[in-house]
Amino acid sequence: MTSPKRFMLLIAVTTAALSGLGQAQTDWKAQLGDYKGKTIRILMIQDPWVDSFAQINPEFETLTGAKVTVDAFGYDQTHAKEVLVGTSKSSDYDVVVLDSPWVGEFAEGGFVENLNS
């Protein structure tokens, strides 16, 4: 399983690459690494911006070799599913994108990782 910290870095770098920031100077394939045969599973709220994943995932997959799957649900359903995933220490998802009001609840539950470091 890909660590959420590593994945968030990969997404941030890929987003920068796809937006053209420094693309000519950076070998993004080398920077992102080789994840051929791996699947990165994401759980998130079905917001309008989720559709952008459909646009960037093919490029990310080409650069890394990883397959990206996104499960997106309505607000309440996502919260319930994320609580279940967190409390059961499930490995069903590599990345759980949570809404900011849930941060305290999830931190107290012990199923979020500090990404500052």
Image (cartoon, rainbow, N blue to C red):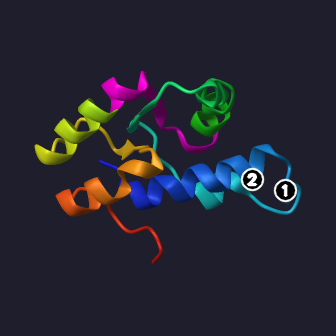
Q: Does residue 116 appear left or right of residue 114 in this picture?
A: right
73 is within the stretch colored magenta? yes
CA neighbours of label 1 inside 10 A, class few (<14), some (14 to 19), many (20+)? few
Residue 53: x and y in percent read: 61, 30
Residue 48: x and y in percent read: 63, 24
Which image quarter: residue 40? top left
45 is within the stretch colored magenta? no
Identify the secondary structure beneath mark 1: loop
- Residue 78 versus residue 110 in the image, above or below: above
Q: Does residue 15 appear left or right of residue 42 in this picture?
A: right
Which amino acid, by three-letter code, is at mark 1?
Answer: Leu
Is 65 or 98 nearer to us in this picture?
98
Of callouts 2 and 1, which one flags the residue occurring earlier in the amino acid sequence? 2
Residue sitting at the far left: 88
Q: Which residue is mark 1?
A: 21
Task: Evaluate if marks 2 and 1 touch, with contact meaning CB atoms under 8 Å apart.
Answer: yes
Which image quarter: residue 23? bottom right
The magenta stretch is 63-78
Q: How many marks?
A: 2
**Res. 16 mark:** 2
Residue 90: x and y in percent read: 16, 41
- Residue 102 versus residue 47 in the image, above or below: below
CA neighbours of label 2 inside 10 A, class few (<14), some (14 to 19), many (20+)? some
